[in-house]
Image: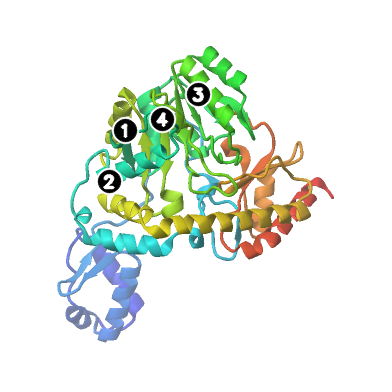
Amino acid sequence: MNNDSSSRIVSRVKDWIAGAAPGAKLPSTRQLVAEYQASPVTVQKALRTLTAQGLIESRPGVGTFVRAYRTARPSDYGWQTAALRSAQTARPLNSAAMRSASNDVIAFHSGYPDRELLPERLVRAALTRAARGDAALSRPPAQGLPELQSWFAHELSTSTPVGVAPPQPSDVVVLPGSQSGLSSIFRGLVGHGQPLLVESPSYWGALLAAGQAGVNVIPVPSGPEGPDPDELDRAFEESGARLFYAQPNFANPTGAQWSAERGEEVLRIVQRHGAFLVEDDWAHDFGITAPSVPIAAKDDSGHIVYIRSLTKSVSPSVRVAAIIARGPARERIMGAQAAESMYVSGLLQAAALDVVTQPGWQTHLRGLSHQLQSRRDLLVTSLREHVPQAHLSHLPKGGLNLWLRMPDGFDVERLTKDCEAAGVLIAAGTEWFPAEPEGPYVRLNYAGPNPGRFPEGARIIGEAVAAQLGL
């Protein structure tokens, strides 16, 4: 054919592909040049077009082939609607806190600290050493590396008072992140359709895990000092629940920290009902003006299942956490965990252990405390100046978040959209409530990037609030 147009060649080759079997080999470039009486440049241009359209693929040194998978028509997944039936939970699978953000926005929404707050040098060195060791190629024990088990047990034992038996390394189960642990606990200790008491508001990930496990979530009101003991006692009595999930230290989202007296009172209630307290110590390393003192340190009778995570304080890429549980409860949790993940990457366990046992780890934590305090105070000052309508019930002594109450009747979903349109990401408080929200709240993370823009972000939030209130 006397035709040197690449578009004409594309059209003719498409016709040939339509009748060819997936994986069929195209004629060589030399053959195509001869067939279409075109230059090699024109033929190559046509082949590049067909490759970009996903119709062919080139294998260097072998030839060009018809792609094995081609979309001839839109896929129809309607059958899955009938197969899957109704979802067990209407709770969204991804929180606003998990959204990625571009560098040009002011991000108050994230659930993680900014990269500059992480021990980057320690992490990089630890991963390098771990990659050179046996952990990179061997399967670790299902319950975790013994050295890491010992470290977690020792960390909790440092708060154990005289007269209470400290935890043993054999009580520790290492996890691929605390979220995985929550799922295993709810499946192993509660079970489908059974009641689970949770603080309200509470960590959205725990509510998601509970929903996926099919448990019946029962909210217990909780404020800056923790849950009301009478309400908790009544909830146990009326529901017959045998497990209460809570964050006694720097709760997400409120930042609340229970007093020692409140913790002891809650423990007595749990013991009296023959139940478990799941103590999620997610912010153990994020104390600012107060340390995290686990209630689990005061219990040696197996009533407290303790979770400690290193994911946020070491690195989001080092997903390592641990459960400390005693008695048959540990075996139930391990059984549920084995069905999900079997074991945690030995490479990540070795790296995490390396980081937290370096002398520089404690130095890093001291510096982190000062940085968090500076960021927290800067954001609080900026909000008081630019968003006087918002109410901050208490100044958190640790953690990463501020919990702001907006005026009654305020539309926080609209606020998040208005702020995002102006370049500021915030998280509406709705998803932290296991039932209807008790009021309009927003959660702001003060550990996000670029604290120098916190005042600007607060100003934009204030303008959006004022516009909604008609001020």
Residue 460 % position (x, y): 72, 58
| Residue occupying the point 32% across, 41% down | 174
Report, in whole angstroms, how far the alpha carbon at label 3 lies from the one at label 2: 30 Å
Rate crowding at label 4 as few (under 14), some (14 to 19) or many (20 or more) other CA atoms within 10 Å: many
Residue 354 % position (x, y): 32, 55
Label 3 or label 4, whichever comes before in sequence order? 3
Identity, as a three-letter code, of the amino acid under mark 4 = Val
Q: Is residue 125 visible?
A: yes
Report, in whole angstroms, how far the alpha carbon at label 2 lies from the one at label 4: 21 Å
Between residues 216 and 175, which one lies in front from this camera angle?
Answer: 175
Do callouts 3 and 4 mark residues in contact (Cβ within 8 Å)? Answer: no
Q: Which residue, as the protein is rendered here, is positioned at the far left?
A: 62
| Residue occupying the point 54% across, 38% down | 249
Label 3 or label 1, whichever comes before in sequence order? 1
Which residue lies under the disc numbered 3?
A: 267
Which residue lies under the disc numbered 2?
A: 147
Query: In the shown orientation, is residue 98 left or right of residue 422?
Result: left
| Residue occupying the point 33% across, 79% down | 6
Indicate the quadrant where residue 34 lies: bottom left
Instruction: Name the front one of labels 3 and 4.
Output: 3
Label 2 or label 4, whichever comes before in sequence order? 2
Label 1 or label 2, whichever comes before in sequence order? 2
Identity, as a three-letter code, of the amino acid under mark 1 = Asp
Residue 122 % position (x, y): 38, 61
Q: Is residue 28 above or below residue 320?
A: below
Which residue lies under the disc numbered 1?
A: 171
SS of the residue at dot 1?
helix
Which residue lies under the disc numbered 4?
A: 305
